[in-house]
Amino acid sequence: MAFSEVAPFAKTGGLADVGGALPLALGNLGCQVRIVMPFYNRFVEELAEADPVVENVPVVFGSQVIDTDIYRGQLNDSIEVYFIRRDEFFDRTYLYGTPKGDYFDNFQRFTYFCKAALSVCSAVQFQPDIVHCHDWQSGLIPAYLKHLVAAEDLLAGTASMFTIHNIAYQGQFAANLFPQTGLPDSFFSVDGMEFWGGINFMKAAIVCADVITTVSPRYSEEIQTKEYGHKLEGVLQMHQRKLHGIINGANYEEWNPENDPYIAANYSRENLEGKHMCKLDLLRTVKLPERLMNRPLLGVVSRLADQKGLNLLAAVMDKFVAYDLGLVILGVGEDKYHTLLTALAERYPEKVAVRLEFDERLAHKIEAGADMFLMPSQYEPCGLNQMYSLRYGTVPIVRATGGLYDTITPFNSTKGKGVGFRFTDYKPESFWETAKTALDLFSQTETWRQIMKNGMATDFSWLSSAEQYLKLYEKTVAEKAAESRQQAADSTQSATEGGIGKQKAKDRRKRGKA
Ligand code: ADP
């Protein structure tokens, strides 16, 4: 598996959670998984003390050969993680860019990563059946497997899977960089990685991977439409046959109120008492008044990016505040949202607390201490926080998109079923109307407890997702093997036919002479 982030080694969002959990679940099913990721010095300081497992592995990059050192870590006892160390590329403060924008050399950084990731296989003599790549940062790997691997190579016949975790981030760069990829000229075309005059890593992966997945069934349909496809909808429609939606799992070893070490008191579906303590602890931690113990407390933990619906939240803030409730927001991301949220917190210091940082502990405290969790996303490929919220009895209010649609069944008061609240139109009125329904129900203690308990009973553990991936790996590998056998048979046949053809021509010439 090739990942640009894996928890606990480096994390900006849900991608790292998948990187840290899916391999473990697959390992439990008997797969032998090895992971490759960049060596981000700042995030893996302790590894820097260790010796590399292989030194000076040559990586052809454009017209140069740039060596890499490979370091090794462990995800658990059996799953190894290989780190590509090349400090001029990966020794940075952030993973992909600063709050002001992407790093200027992301093309070089991740082209190098893709090339080096494949070199790891021969360097450590590991021959995978399938390479599973995740998001644009590893998007060139399927293209390299298809176009650059020679017949005698260790990786000849290796299948590839590409998972789209978020189609908005595609890895688009100027066309003049194309030669540095080392891919054949013909690949700079409409059937290859050319995209509106530039190049696009995600498109390269969609075109070349043997199978494509995305992180929820709903999102797999959405990304084939103009509204959600970010201009790749046409390409995806063309490759629809190999596109599948598999929902992410939640890692309940990390996210479980029964034994979460970060929260003030543990609690369970059977005994909710501790949740009260967690609410008090959260109010104290973020310095909101304790009188809010009697009012609904809402939580948000999010990357601060356009997709997350923060404008919608800002647009209904006055209404929320007028309802008299507490709101705790934890997030980092784009500068404009830092400014927007800071202004909101200053305007409503008694009701709104904002923390602009990445804080794992506070994220857990919010999941446990809040009564409701807001995810008004414009789009959400899968979303993990709503699954965590369910387990913590923190009722999600979400927009019905992607994985939020697939995981949050709306509460139905007649049947007493459903786990949360969801709205469809990306409009402040719709968000507010739905939030108001939830807020009004909050005071009906018995009903509210029912909703909480319904959510706490849901199970999105990784096992069932991993089983689906395994099935797909097996099918893809079998198809790839059949394809390779067919190609081998075809080339033998054409060689034989070529031989027979030559003999016939010789015979004809002989007859002619006679
Ligand atoms: P995305 O991958 O789009 O960021 P997800 O909901 O799939 O969204 O995953 C987000 C993950 O990142 C969750 O584990 C969430 O708790 C975590 N997270 C996001 N922002 C922060 C933050 N500021 N501090 C701590 N954890 C955060």
Image (cartoon, helix red, strand yellow):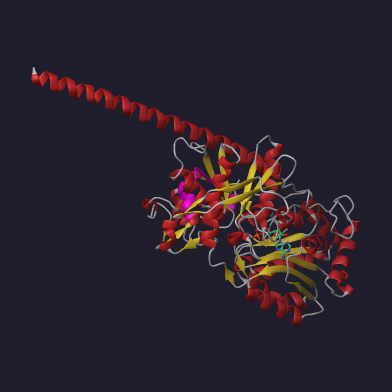
- Residue 18 point in image, percent of width and height: 67, 50
Q: Residue at x 65, y 40 (%)?
A: 33
Tell me: residue 76, above or below residue 421: above
Ligand 1 is in which quadrant of the figure?
bottom right
Residue 495: which quarter of the image?
A: top left
Q: Is residue 228 visible?
A: no
Does 43 appear in magenta? no
Q: Is residue 39 left or right of residue 278?
A: left
Q: Residue at x 62, y 69 (%)?
A: 98
Q: Residue furthest bottom?
A: 347
- Residue 497 point in image, percent of width and height: 29, 25
Which segment did they paint magenta? 203-218
**Quadrant of the image containing the C terminus:** top left
Asked whether 279 or 99 is in front, the reply is 99
Q: Residue at x 83, y 66 (%)?
A: 443
Residue 44: which quarter of the image?
A: bottom right
Tell me: residue 490, above or below residue 245: above
Q: Is residue 147 left or right of residue 91?
A: left
Residue 511: which quarter of the image?
A: top left
Q: Is residue 488 visible?
A: yes
Asked whether 181 or 387 is in front, the reply is 181
- Residue 424 point in image, percent of width and height: 61, 63
> What is the total number of numbered labels drawn onto the structure image?
0
